Image (cartoon, rainbow, N blue to C red):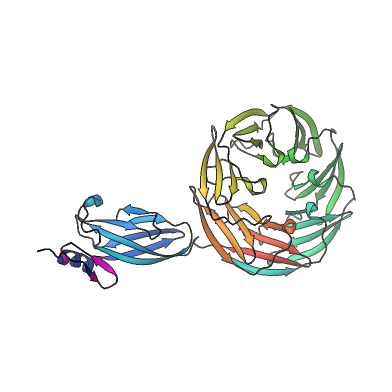
Amino acid sequence: MRLETALFLAGGLSIGNIAFAQCSGLLSSTAISTSVSGFTVTATMQNLPAGYSVRWTNGTGSGSYCSNPGSWTYASPGSYNITGAIYSASGCSTSFPTSCSRVATVTVTGVSGYNMQYWDASVANAWGGSDYTWVGDFNGDGYQDIASASGGNVYMKLGQSTHSFRSETWPVSNQWGGPGYTWAGDFNRDGITDIASASGGVIYMKLGTGSGFRSETWSVANSWGGSSFTKVGDFNGDGYKDIASASGGNVYMKLGQAGGFRSETWVVTNQWGGGDYTWAADFNRDGRTDIASASGGTIYVKYGGSGGFTSSAATVANNWGGSAFTWVADFNGDGYTDIASANGDVVYMKFGNSAGFSSSNWTVPNQWPTGYVWVADVNKDGRADIVSGSGSTVTARISDGSRFLVQNYTLNNGWGGSGYTFPMDVGNDKDFDIVSGDGGTLHVKESIN
């Protein structure tokens, strides 16, 4: 005997045109259990008899999974109603009964074990221009600091173990090149961040000593390309930081060595994109810095080597966001440097590989505040993420290797100017933090892992 009219069970479970007793028995003996890890949910229909299967729908209208247990990943935190429909044959091949189902509500909290907190630190209200302000470990104690130069002084905000900053002023020689030719890095391999500033045939060095700077002048060849085509990295793989400055078919090299730079000219193909779409990174995983320059559907790569560059070109999809929203990092965790370029609700991905690049698109919410966007591995899973700040909200676009998962954090609305806002590691805990200088206050958004 079959029941031909629709019946409704308590809890909103609908049954129609099926054997009531059969479905009722299944529903009385089964139950849904769920587990949540970050954005991923695993659901199991417990006590399901042999010969039956389950089709899960994930509450977003975009996912259906025939397995028990079923597992899927949501794009953002929230509360979702998941449905497990019981089928009368393995593999969900026979529609018995499509409406014989259980419903459960699951709460997705986002990245497991990751959160952010907010605090302020008082510092001396002494700053140079934003183009002469850098982050590094300038005293070699393992904690990241902020250095801001103005004339013969560098105003230091020194990170400490107490999750605070100590203000000092370090005198230096008042000799500087332009901001586009001034860089912070460890140029003499002593583990302390230095400042190098180039002007014509000299580079003015502020070498970190642990308690101040020692000013020196290092001579180089007076050969330079434009500032947007001048990059710092280890291009010959010897462990010293070099400076590479490209102009047409030449890259003028200032190769780091003990006590100074050695000048050379490395010949390359005269194929370049714009300076804002030219980056220095290790794109082929050989331990040497390369230069990649994008123009439309082509990325021109100059691969670093012990004695020169090897020029190559890779074809990619001709879709790009603005240069301020284009970044290089390893977004899918395969060890190769990728390029991500955001435009509205799409991030155009150029994934590095042994043959060049492959193109893909990842969808995200259209939330991009100018000047307050950074790239870092916020949850320490080996994949780069994109983080932005706007008002009281910090938005993390967390890569799972195949897309970005979006999570928002509500914090105090405290920000300095974008030129004085930095991604840095506060407290030497290897976490991604945001520090924003605002006069005599540093507004800190600190990760908790």
Q: Is residue 20 above or below residue 372?
A: below
Can residue 430 be seen? no
Q: Can residue 13 be found in the magenta stretch?
A: yes
440 left or right of 286 in image: right
Q: Position of residue 341 (x, y in %)?
A: 60, 45
- Asked if the stretch drawn in magenta spans residue 315, the answer is no
Q: Quadrant of the N terminus?
A: bottom left
- Considering only vertical position in the picture, is 437 above or below 270? below
Residue 405: x, y in percent? 50, 55
Which residue sits furthest left?
1
Residue that appears at 58% across and 51% down: 344
Q: Nearer the viewer, residue 57 or 449?
A: 57
**Residue at (44%, 57%) from the top-left corner?**
74
Please provide the residue range marked out in magenta.
Answer: 8-20
Placement of the C terminus among the 4 image quadrants: bottom right
Q: Quadrant of residue 371?
A: bottom right
**Quadrant housing residue 330:** top right
Looking at the image, which residue sits at the far front? 5
- Say which of 224 and 19 sits in front: 19
The image position of residue 216, as x and y in percent, is 87, 45
Residue 160 visible in the picture:
yes
- Residue 376 position within the rendered picture, expressed as x and y whole percent measured from the top left: 61, 52
88 left or right of 77? left
Q: In the image, what residue occupies the spot 25% across and 66% down?
A: 14
Would you say 426 lies left or right of 399 here? right
Give whichever of 263, 392 is nearer the camera: 392
Examine the rendered structure and indicate whether residue 183 appears above or below residue 77: above
Give the total of numbered labels. Answer: 0
